[in-house]
Image (tube, rainbow, N blue to C red):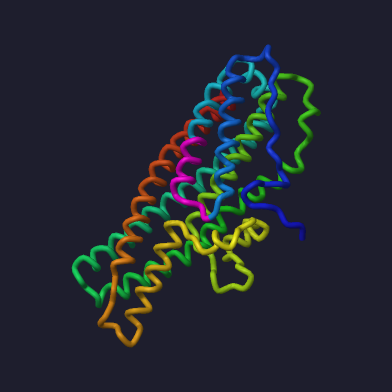
Amino acid sequence: MAKSSFLNASNCPLRSISLPSRLHSNSHKIEAELNKAKACKKSFLLAPLQAKTVKDGLVRLAELYNCVEDFINSPSNQQALHQQREKLVDEALDASVAFLDTCDAARDFLSTLKEYIEDIQLALRRGQYSRIESKVSAYLCFTKKMKKDFSKCLRPLKYMERKMQSSPALLDFDDHDMLMVVKVLGEVKMITISVFRCLVLSLTVPEKKVKLGGWSLIAKLIHTASFPLENDQRNNANEVESAHDALCSLLEQFQGINAGEVDAQVAKTKLEALEMSIEGLQVGLDSMRRCLLQNRVSLLNILTN
């Protein structure tokens, strides 16, 4: 099987948009926002994916969708969408469902993860060591389960990506307005898939015991096998991984011979950092969800008008 990079989508290169100058003035704005979003995507090539990097990607994506609202509501583009609404609008609506599902799954995961963190922090503050072990075990079981749940969320995105690869060439459209609409909607979808994939990857923990630095089920599904990581990068970790390692170490202390000499300070520090990163991601996801809902309303209006 041919390998493809999860983050740079080498099999689906994002084409640079060059729009006719005679088109609506919004074309220049959407072109600028698309280029900014693609430039932001380069930061995803750094490993490990930090929460701030992903949050910045979500914020940039939300700004892109705000710009898309003006774009699809312009008179010339409204006409183009009406002409091909059974294809373009229906496909865009299907994509919005998949994106909203992924967004909601991530929001639910972060909300529940935060609850687990708060339970562990409370037990640590009160020195309830009898409860800490069970709380940490529950946390680790939850994050393991969520890997499988996330893999299900990504399948529609992967299907969408494959479908776009087999779609007709843009040159098949002779109308300039139609060409512009198809190119913009296609690139927005590809950027959204990339950002959500990176979001999911940042929230999962690699299986470090697998030989050759292999990744977990979620990583295999999203084809990270060819993602280049330097040796020093493998030794680093983002907020999720750091908290996971600290809690595993804490659990080992409780289960060890010297269970009475437990040092929980590292775990406390890592949990605080993870909690802050979760709050940042929640802000980004809330903003993204509002934009996705507004985009869906605009598309539905095109169908009904």
Residue 267 picture location, percent across and down:
33, 66
Please identify the residue farthest to the bottom as the structure is shown.
257
**Residue farthest along the left direction in this orientation:** 126
27 relative to 285 in the view: left or right? right
| Residue 193 location, quadrant | top right
Residue 59 on the magenta span:
yes
How many marks are shown on the rendered structure? 0
Q: Is residue 278 above or below residue 30?
A: below
- Where 195 falls versus 115 (above or below)? above
Q: Nearer the viewer, residue 47 or 184?
A: 47
Residue 24, how many percent across, how many down? 62, 14
- From this viewpoint, which residue is outermost toward the front? 232
Magenta segment: 48-61
Residue 121: image x %, image y %? 27, 63
Q: Quadrant of the C terminus?
A: top right
Residue at (50% x, 41% y) in the render: 57
Q: Who's the residue at 68% across and 12% down the image?
A: 22
In the image, residue 227 sits, relative to residue 78, either above or below, namely below
Q: Main secondary structure of the magenta part?
A: helix
- The residue lying at 32 percent from left, 80 percent from top is 254
Q: Position of residue 145 (x, y in %)?
A: 47, 66
* Quadrant holding the N terminus: bottom right
Of residue 87 and residue 124, the one placed in the foreground of this image is: 124
Of residue 115 and residue 155, the one placed in the foreground of this image is 115
Asked whether 135 falls inside the magenta stretch, the response is no
* Residue in the foreground of this view, choosing between 128 and 93: 128
Residue shown at 44%/49% (left/top)?
51
Quarter holding residue 99: top right
